[in-house]
Image: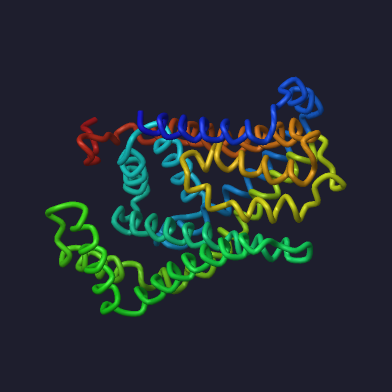
Amino acid sequence: MRPLVVAAVSLVVGALVVRFVGTVDWSQVVSAWQRLSPVTGAVLLVGLLVRQVLNAVPLSRFVPGLSLPRSLQNDAAANVTGTVAPPPADVVVRVAMFRSWEVNPVDGMAGVTLNMLVFYAVRFLAPALGLLVLAYRGVESAQIVSAGLSALVAVAIIVALVLVARGDAFAAWLGRAAGRVARRVRDGVDPESWSGAVVDFRGRMAETLRTGLAPAMAALVAMVVTDSLILLMALRFVGVGPEVLAWTEVVGGFLLVYPLTLMPLFGLGVLDAALVAAWTASAGTAWEAEIVAALVLWRSVTILGPLSAGAITIAVWQRRNPGWDSREGELTRSAA
């Protein structure tokens, strides 16, 4: 229920912002969609496949014994489960799949944690990349400040990961400090146990982090850029040409607001409204319907596509592993 609530909030916020931009002529949106063909749909799906493969690279580098195809399956299954069910349902599915593939689930979840942290770093690095794309046309001081602050967060995450990989001392201090902060919010938290957990995590993942951090960062940066290119193709397919919005405005603008993907369903509603506001300010409100149509098309591909793939992945995996079941969060092999 919780995912549906937060998604509804995102949609409402997005709708309110769009109202300030202008009144969308939905008949024109439909008209823009009618320009699409099966070929354009196939091109967008190929772009989505590239995006999802790049997204799966870090997990395959951080989890010993996990191949790229299985990393892709694990991500897809966890994505759809985390969208339709409350936590820790996605963790249960990930662990079940790791065990069925004879991958150590502790190593697997440590890799998932590393994957998440690196993605956070890339997410906050994206606005700085957006500034580079837009640099030739000039950027506003507010954009520079927000991108700079975002980049600092990304650097802090990367530095922390590097320091954790280098030795137990920093890992112990980091875990203890995090535990003290958590104890202020929640009674019963033991900072020393947090310290030990981070040290144990470091011991398991130090080598894979040292060898996998750079490839994981590169793959996720490429994934974010691919996401922006899928959106660029969607704009072109509905009729928004380069004379209306240059590729730099599309890619750079998307990267500037990419941290909004922290919101539920990849920032659904909020991110879209921010892009509609920015691009209609540049192209003019006469192009608002086409811009909205492109965003709807992009969302259809990048949200419904992975969710559909995840549902199929779970169905196929369950057919191949009928003996695996989940009871009270512990995964056991049921009797034949």
- 274 or 225: nearer the eye? 274
Name the spot of residue 149 as percent of width and height, x first. 51, 65
Is 300 on the left or on the right of 190, as rendered?
right
Residue 4 to residue 66: above or below: above
Quarter where residue 139 is shown: bottom right
Name the spot of residue 201 as percent of width and height, x first. 29, 65
Q: Residue at x 62, y 58 (%)?
A: 222
Is 138 on the left or on the right of 256, as rendered?
right
Residue 216 visible in this rendered orientation of the protein? no
Q: Quadrant of the N terminus?
A: top left
Q: Residue at x 75, y 43 (%)?
A: 233
Name the spot of residue 321 as percent of width and height, x first. 36, 36
Quarter where residue 19 is shown: top right
Residue 336 to residue 259: above or below: above
Quarter where residue 126 is shown: bottom right
Name the colour scheme.
rainbow
Residue 246 visible in this rendered orientation of the protein? yes
Is 143 on the left or on the right of 101, as rendered?
right
Residue 170 to residue 286: above or below: below
Residue 132 to residue 166: above or below: above
- 58 or 178: nearer the eye? 178
Q: Quadrant of the C terminus?
A: top left
